[in-house]
Image (cartoon, rainbow, N blue to C red):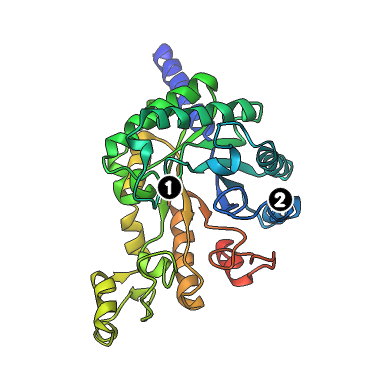
Amino acid sequence: MKQLVLILSVCLFSFLSQANDQVILGKGTNLAHYISQTSRTGEDRRNFLSEKDIAYIASLGFDHVRLPIDEKQMWFEDGQKDAVAFQLMHNVIKWSLHHDLKVVIDLHILRSHHFNAKKKPLWTDLNEQEKFINLWRDLSEELKSYPTDKLVYELMNEPVADDPEDWNKLVQKVFSEIRSLEADRWIVIGSNRWQSADTFDELKIPNDRKIILSYHFYEPFLLSHYKTPWTFLKPYDGPVNYPGPILKKKDFNALPSEQQGIVKDYVGKKFDKKTLLKMMEKPLAKAKKLGLPLYCGEYGVFFTVSEKDRLAWYKDMMEIFREHHISSANWNYKSKAFGFVDDQGKPIPAMRDVLLEK
């Protein structure tokens, strides 16, 4: 009997130790448009972000930053590293660690894969897949000395493959390579088709305990991307509402026919906290089944939505994250469009406070 109790105690201790060893990212923010999705160069790029920004983020009580990096920002076309861009990346990591923030290095856009491009050679060209893996070899060589419980790798932002198996196979390849280089590094893996919650059941995860599951959440899209100039919603200038029916029938009927065609699928559909949570069922279920931490690496609503409705959505999101132990990073830090600090570095108090649940 004593032997049985001892065995059970050892097993329980092992289980709890494994669970306690998990890297929980907590509450974070994206450092977008610095060495990703930017046309800034030289001093303009360098000055866009400083240690003061990182200190400010830490002072607010955030736990981590997610740093998107693009292939064309970090590597020249011949595959050589851009020393200046790599130094910017190292600066952010060092500042963050100094201010007790964890860091997610997110390989955001590849030359062979942009999440909104029609053609994505990554899925059809084995040479491009090898280039992708080589980028991670380079990154590992640069970053392997940083603490494994403080710096996390995210394989790729928002993969969009027509066949989900193409992403699953590539995950296995690049994950295996990184794991051969770094046995203890935590790795973020997201779902196919813009890291959608709805495709999470198609995602195949390597048999490994040091994985963080990731999804992005911009639902309902009519709300989150209202009047965005880069989406199909650009021509729509009718109303949106949250919570409740996002587009009322009477408002829909008053629209010109060309706008009705854009938003017809949203008429009378109700969205609230309960709806949003239901839309996250698949990632929540997979995280629970596999016993892995869950991370919403991007979420947000464009600033064109009324402040009242926009903040109501964020409030519901923050409650869901807290109640279901989901780490998160809003999109993004420094941006009038989505952020809680504008492009000149001036805080946007209402956005900042809702993210901090004040």
Along the polypeptide, which appears first: circle 1 or circle 2?
A: 2
**Rendered image: mark on residue 307:** none
Vertical placement of 170 versus 117: above or below? above
Residue identified by numbered label 2 = 42
Vertical placement of 10 versus 72: above or below? above
What x and y, as percent, mark residue 143? Answer: 63, 30
Quarter of the figure that contains the C terminus: bottom right
Give the image quarter of residue 214.
Answer: top left
Q: How far, Cα to Cα, is label 1 from label 2?
A: 24 Å
Left or right, 155 with reference to 351: left
Report the amino acid beneath label 1.
His
What x and y, as percent, mark residue 43? Answer: 74, 53
Label 1: which secondary element: loop
Identity of the residue drawn at 32% across and 35% down: 124
**Rendered image: mark on residue 114:** 1
User: What crowding class fits label 1: few (fewer than 14 Cα within 10 Å), some (14-19), or many (20 or more)?
Assistant: some
Give the image quarter of residue 252.
Answer: bottom left
Identity of the residue drawn at 39% across and 74% down: 242
What x and y, as percent, mark residue 233? Answer: 36, 70
Quarter of the figure that contains the N terminus: top left
